[in-house]
Image (cartoon, rainbow, N blue to C red):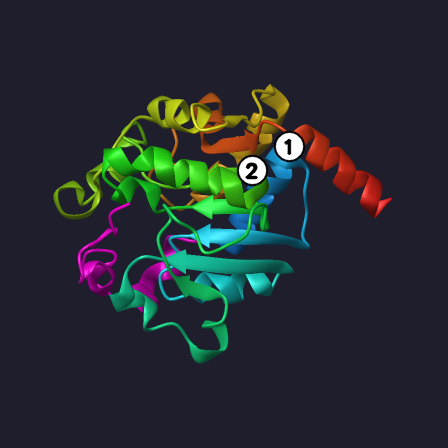
Amino acid sequence: MKKLQHAVDADYHDYYDGERPYEECWKECFCERYTTDLIRAIWSWSPPYKLLDSGSANGLTLAAFDSIGVEAWGVENSAYIHRRTPKEWRHRNLLGDVRKLPFEDRSFDFVYDTCLAHLPPEDLNQAVSELYRVCRIGVFYGGHAADMTGKVVESFDVDDNIRSLFSLERWSEIFLRNGFKIATSDRRRLARAWKIEQDANASQISPWYADAMSMRFCFYSRTDSIRTMNSKKMHRA
């Protein structure tokens, strides 16, 4: 397998919002409680659990997750931003390739992914199959999609950094053919997820997603995750 080079441009994180470096604006694009609230709404899981941040930059998200009881690890392809990882998080924020993750099978309960859209289409099957391999329950795909709301799509730097810009439904086809299933189509669960999305973007012009039903294409479970989840519940009991 060829080594993945330059998933994003070297200066991508220096102008993360178009003007400021990642360290100054990352919290405007990420919220640890938003992520864990969505996992709770879709899978009925609350911390503590173990999570992989796929596309973790310099690992600042790991400290945020840790503050609410999530044991988060990261994998980042860009050596440029990875070298800015704080010393105390270097053991958990690894420089690596999502197509060949440096973790054992089923190392994590969940994966939070924001890096897939930065890969060329020909690499996606390998990358998604790797996410399947290392997770126990499921994946929250939080990356870019072509059918996100207008203001969000307008902010995409497609020419420089997004190599796979697909609709959410097209993303679902990639996940499904690599072993996953859609985590839920239950309208009550999706309504809870939609409220979390709306509340998180209350100060913005619009949420990232078009409606509650479109959000079902953000969450994927392993095909054997029902058995895994039942086993976990029995263990907790």
Q: Position of residue 4 (x, y in %)?
A: 25, 51
Quick check: 205 above or below 72?
above
- Kindly tell me whether residue 225 is visible in this rendering: yes
Query: Which residue is painted at 25% across and 34% down in the image?
Result: 122
Q: Nearer the viewer, residue 20 or 59?
A: 59
Judge the density around disc 2: few (<14), some (14-19), many (≥20) Cα neighbours within 10 Å: many
Query: Which residue is painted at 36% across and 45% down in the image?
Result: 99
Q: Is residue 92 magenta?
A: no
* Discs 1, 2 touching: Cβ within 8 Å: yes
Q: Secondary structure at mark 1?
A: helix
Q: Position of residue 23 (x, y in %)?
A: 33, 68
Q: How far is the residue under mark 1 from the one under mark 2? A: 8 Å
Find disc 2 in the rendering and name its residue. Answer: 138
**Which span is picked out in magenta?**
1-30
Q: Residue furthest front?
A: 1
Q: Quadrant where the N terminus lies?
A: top left
Q: Position of residue 22 (x, y in %)?
A: 30, 64
The amino acid type, in three-letter code, at marker 2 is Gly
Q: Is residue 2 magenta?
A: yes
Query: Which residue is painted at 25% across and 52% down in the image?
Result: 3
Q: Nearer the viewer, residue 65 or 110?
A: 110
Say left or right for 29 vs 17.
right
Q: Nearer the viewer, residue 107 or 198?
A: 107
